[in-house]
Amino acid sequence: KIREMIMSDSKIIEIFKKLNSVTHAITSIGNFSKNATFISSGFLSDNDLRVLAGAKAVGDYCGIFFDINGHICKTAVSERLIGIDFEKLKKIPNVIGIASGPEKAEAILGALRTGGINILITDEVTALEVNSKMNE
C-alpha cells in the first residue's frame, strides 16, 4: 500500500516518465552474501531471504531479482520495491553492470543472462570465475 501511494504521487510519476529517454544506466550487481547491501542494511528479512531462496534467486540489480539462468524472480519482495521495471530497463541502449569478486560469479552470470545488462565492468579474477560457471 505504501508503494502504491508513493507511485501515485505526481512528482514520482514525472520522474518515472523520464526513464523513457534514458540512454545509459549504471547498476551494481548484488548477490546474497552476508556483506550484500540488501542484507547488511537490514532491508531483507530472514523470511525475505527464504522467499528469494525458494525462487532460486542468485542476485539482483536495480532491485530486480533473478536466478542463474537469467529468469526474473517475481516475489512479494520485488512487489514492494520502487525502481525501474525490467521491461523498461531492457529498452535502455547501454546498461552497464558493475561487480567484482569471485563470490559474485553466479550473480553476474545470472544478470548477464537476463538480457538486461549489455556491458559488464569487472576484474580478471571475477571474469575467469564467471567463465568457469558458464561451463558448469
Image: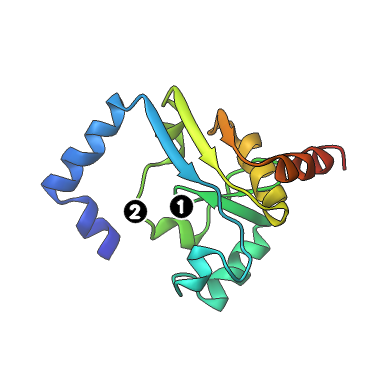
Of residues 45 and 103, the one nearer the viewer is 103
Cβ atoms under marks 1 and 2 closer than 8 Å: yes
- x and y percentages locating residue 108 in the rendered image: 65, 44
Furthest toward the left, the residue is 10
Q: How is the image coloured?
A: rainbow
Furthest toward the front, the residue is 124
Of residues 92 and 51, the one nearer the viewer is 92
Q: Is 93 located above or below residue 13 in the figure?
A: above
Furthest toward the right, the residue is 136
Which residue bears the numbered disc 2?
82
Would residue 7 be found to the left or right of residue 131 on screen? Answer: left
Which element type, helix, strand or loop, lies under badge 1? Answer: loop
Q: Amino acid at mark 2?
A: Ile
Cα separation, mark 1 vs mark 2, equals: 8 Å
- x and y percentages locating residue 126 in the rendered image: 71, 45
- x and y percentages locating residue 91 in the rendered image: 43, 25
Q: Amino acid at mark 1?
A: Gly
Q: Residues within 10 Å of mark 2 (few under 14, many from 20)?
A: few
Q: Residue at x 74, y 45 (%)?
A: 125
Q: Residue at x 39, y 28 (%)?
A: 24
- Look at the image and tell me in which quarter the C terminus lies: top right
Earlier residue among tags 1 and 2:
1
- Look at the image and tell me in which quarter the N terminus lies: bottom left
Q: Residue at x 78, y 45 (%)?
A: 129
Asked whether the viewer can see residue 1, the reply is no
Would residue 42 be found to the left or right of residue 57 on screen? Answer: left
Which residue bears the numbered disc 1?
63
